[in-house]
Amino acid sequence: LPELQEQGYGTIQLPPAGLPDGVASKWLDQVAEHVAEFVRNDYEVVLADDGTSAVALGGKLAELGVGELPALPR
């Protein structure tokens, strides 16, 4: 993460595995709102995810009018 910051990148942490579903959902609500704001302000946003949050986050972003995020190449 420090290397990303040095290069001018920011990160938004996705919820960690093992959280109760309600807590993870509320966490993703906040992530989606932040991402939507970045997209509205023409920031380039990519998803770096292990696959556990992509579908749920995608649904929340769609509710906010944000299309599918490109995934960070593995």
Image: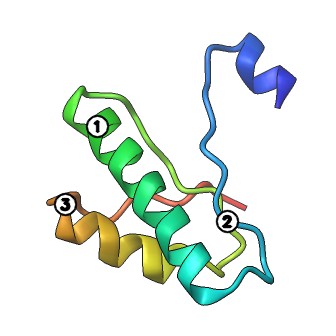
Q: Residues within 10 Å of mark 2 (few under 14, many from 20)?
A: some
Residue at 76%, 11% (x, y): give it: 6
Q: Position of residue 22 (x, y in %)?
A: 54, 83
Mark 1 in CB contact with mark 3 (< 8 angstroms): no
Disc 2 versus disc 1: distance between alpha carbons? 19 Å
As rendered, which of 46 and 11 lies closer to the eye? 11
Q: Position of residue 58 (x, y in %)?
A: 37, 72
Q: Which sits earlier in the primary sequence, circle 2 or circle 3?
A: 2
Disc 2 versus disc 3: distance between alpha carbons? 19 Å
Question: Which amino acid type corresponds to the residue marked 3 in the rendered image?
Answer: Leu
Residue of label 1: 37
Residue at 28%, 37% (x, y): give it: 37
Q: Which sits earlier in the primary sequence, circle 1 or circle 3?
A: 1
Answer left or right for 42 relative to 31.
left
Label annotation for residue 74? none
Counting every numbered tag in the picture gives: 3
Residue at 29%, 46% (x, y): give it: 36
Indicate whether 46 appears above or below 51. above
Res 8 quadrant in image: top right
Disc 1 versus disc 3: distance between alpha carbons? 10 Å
Residue of label 2: 15
Label annotation for residue 64? 3
Q: Which sits earlier in the primary sequence, circle 2 or circle 1?
A: 2
